[in-house]
Image (cartoon, grey):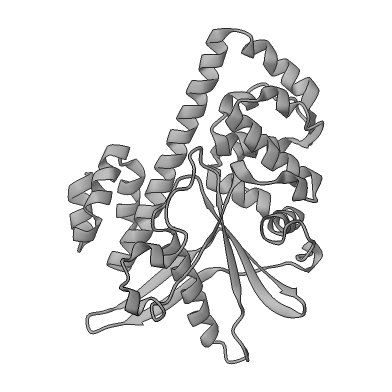
């Protein structure tokens, strides 16, 4: 596990749902309306580095993709793959990204001679941003399709679960429920609501604060594996009583969100560059890490014109 002081929103999400109980509780609530279809004791972590060799007349490109969390389990005796892809920002290309993940996995499975049937996949896009998800959920939403062709154009759909809209009463595991509710209350600025999480896992509270950018909430957090939220929030309430402290919370939250969005943009651009160029050198990775948000935005606008690393470096240097 990454040190808490270095965790991004993506890292926080991966850490929480690396716990089998949390993964199963979340999935059962989000997909199966709270029915206990996925059982934590039957989950197996699945290696999700997907490499697929594409041959063309110019070169062979090794395309690599990694989904955030993938597990293998059975449903009614049928082996299935379930994954969570975390998003802290809205990605208008999410349908295509998820379709790419799934298709590369199926191509990988085809190479496994031991498989008699392909293993079906389900991907949840777990969205933790502060805005409402407002981009396509189906591939056909990207097209203008003539009426005569609609039944012939293949579609691809994604399931987006917005943390702000989850019905937490359907989450069986108490600590997973507290984690989701803490995120919801932090976005609402409802510190009284946080009191109701009587005994909450301390790390999960920190992860919720990282995801929402509410970093001021964890400065004076009591020590221990679990925290008494009444006691902890009483301590923090002392600071909230002054207007200046309230402003500090807003600034801390905004700074946290900005850093999360910058990291998300770097990650998305790196994926796009791998698709365009086949690979990304360590030198270019370093330049992307050090580039300002303004430079990354310029690179995003010019991504379709990129043909070499030199093109990228000219933009972000």
Q: Percent position (x, y) of residue 227?
A: 78, 30
Q: Nearer the viewer, residue 135 or 62?
A: 135
> Which of the 4 quarters of the picture holds residue 85?
bottom right
Q: Percent position (x, y) of residue 82?
A: 63, 66
Q: Nearer the viewer, residue 221 or 155?
A: 155
Identity of the residue furthest to the front in this view: 147
Residue 72 visible from this viewpoint: yes
Q: Percent position (x, y) of residue 126?
A: 57, 52
Q: Classify residue 290 as left or right of residue 94.
A: left
Residue 279 visible from this viewpoint: no
Q: Percent position (x, y) of residue 316?
A: 23, 45
Q: Residue at x 36, y 56 (%)?
A: 270
Q: Residue at x 69, y 38 (%)?
A: 181
> Which of the 4 quarters of the picture holds residue 71?
bottom right
Q: Residue at x 63, y 39 (%)?
A: 207
Quarter the C terminus occupies: top left
Q: Classify residue 148 as left or right of residue 87.
A: left
> Which of the 4 quarters of the picture holds residue 204?
top right
26 up-or-down from 220: above or below: below
Q: Classify residue 94 as left or right of residue 181.
A: left
138 up-or-down from 238: above or below: below
137 up-or-down from 313: above or below: below
Identity of the residue furthest to the top in this view: 242
Q: Residue at x 52, y 86 (%)?
A: 110
How many numbered discs? 0
């Amino acid at each position: 596990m990454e040190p808490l002081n270095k965790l991004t929103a993506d890292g926080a999400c991966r850490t929480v749902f690396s716990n089998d109980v949390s993964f199963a509780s979340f999935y059962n609530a989000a997909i199966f309306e709270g029915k206990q279809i996925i059982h934590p004791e039957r989950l197996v972590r699945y290696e999700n580095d997907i490499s697929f060799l594409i041959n063309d007349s110019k070169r062979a490109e090794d395309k690599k993709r990694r989904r955030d969390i993938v597990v293998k389990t059975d449903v009614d005796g049928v082996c299935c793959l379930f994954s969570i892809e975390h998003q802290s920002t809205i990605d208008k290309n999410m349908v295509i990204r998820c379709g790419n993940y799934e298709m590369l996995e199926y191509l990988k499975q085809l190479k496994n001679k031991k498989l008699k049937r392909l293993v079906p996949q389900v991907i949840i896009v777990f969205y933790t941003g502060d805005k409402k998800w407002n981009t396509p959920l189906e591939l056909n939403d990207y097209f203008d399709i003539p009426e005569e062709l609609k039944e012939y154009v293949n579609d691809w759909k994604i399931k987006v679960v917005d943390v702000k809209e989850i019905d937490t009463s359907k989450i069986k595991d108490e600590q997973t429920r507290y984690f989701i509710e803490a995120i919801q209350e932090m976005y609402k600025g409802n510190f009284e609501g946080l009191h109701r999480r009587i005994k909450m896992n301390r790390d999960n509270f920190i992860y919720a604060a990282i995801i929402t950018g509410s970093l001021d909430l964890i400065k004076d957090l009591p020590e221990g594996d679990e925290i008494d939220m009444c006691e902890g929030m009483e301590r923090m309430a002392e600071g909230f009583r002054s207007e200046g402290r309230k402003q500090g919370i807003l600034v801390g939250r905004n700074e946290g969100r900005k850093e999360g969005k910058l990291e998300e943009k770097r990650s998305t651009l790196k994926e796009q560059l791998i698709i365009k160029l086949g690979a990304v050198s360590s030198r270019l990775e370093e330049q992307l890490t050090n580039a300002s948000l303004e430079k990354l935005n310029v690179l995003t606008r010019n991504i379709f014109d990129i043909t070499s690393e030199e093109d990228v470096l000219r933009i972000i240097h």
